[in-house]
Amino acid sequence: MAITTVIFDIDGLLIDSEPLWHEAATELFNQFGVKLTDAMYTSTTGLRTKEFVQLWFDYFKIDQKFAAESEKNIVEGVLKRIEYKASIMPGVPHIFDFFANKQFKIGLATSSPPSLIDLVVQMTGIGSYLSATASAEYLPYGKPHPQVYLNCAESMNSHPTECICFEDSFNGLIAAKAARMKCVVIPHHSLNKDERWGAADLKLSSLQNFGELHFDRLNS
């Protein structure tokens, strides 16, 4: 089945927000006297904030009665940081123009809340390109479960096998592949040698590098 639809993750892919999530999480956990290592944080990249908080509260034996407020504080802290100091990732205008010129349906699918979607769409100026957005915040399961990708495709009347996804996290990659979609990963440079990226259909160092040869390879 020919590819007709492209779906993008947001955090770490369209906007350099992963360090800001890390900052907000570090600030929160400092209040409880614990610290996540970089490896610990990376292992949960792509999860919803609710799951991220619950998992590490369990690990550090922090009372879950503080979880809901902690989740809220992390999200609010991230939104403020994104608004004031986040940068747009290289290649964002290129990749949206590339698929718009092919008359593709274009969507966003993220574990982040709708408020972050709205902020990033405004900052990047991609609103006119979009056919749909989907957040996993209120779904029973977030990434690596495929539901947010399936919902995004369905809202554009696209079959999953017509879709190509762009991701930066391993949890996102698993979600896209579980949805039976093609997946291009653009991992953070510090994780570039991780062998797990072999599960992707294509790995690149930047959105800017995606071109016709890559498209033809994925659409064959």
Image (spheres, rainbow, N blue to C red):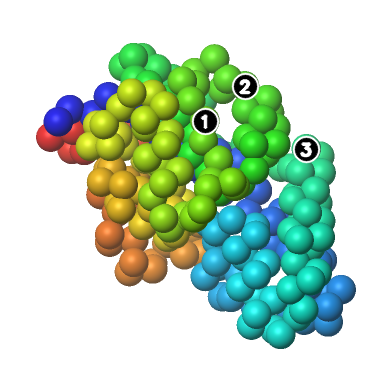
Q: Is residue 37 above or below residue 44?
A: below
Q: Residue at x 38, y 24 (%)?
A: 156
| Residue type highlighted by circle 2 | Gly
Q: Secondary structure at mark 2?
A: loop
The residue tagged 2 is 125
Considering the image in quadrants, where does the N terminus appear?
Answer: top left
Q: Position of residue 201 (x, y in %)?
A: 25, 49
Structural distance between the alpha carbons of marks 3 and 2: 14 Å
Mark found first going from the N terminus, 3 or 2: 3
| Residue type highlighted by circle 3 | Glu
Q: Residue at x 61, y 41 (%)?
A: 15
Considering the image in quadrants, where does the C terminus appear?
Answer: top left
Q: Residue at x 34, y 14 (%)?
A: 103
Mark found first going from the N terminus, 3 or 1: 3
Q: Closer to the camera: disc 2 or disc 1?
A: 1
Q: In the picture, residue 96 is in which quadrant?
A: top left
The residue tagged 1 is 133
Asked whether residue 31 is in view, the answer is yes
Q: What is the number of the mark on residue 83?
A: 3
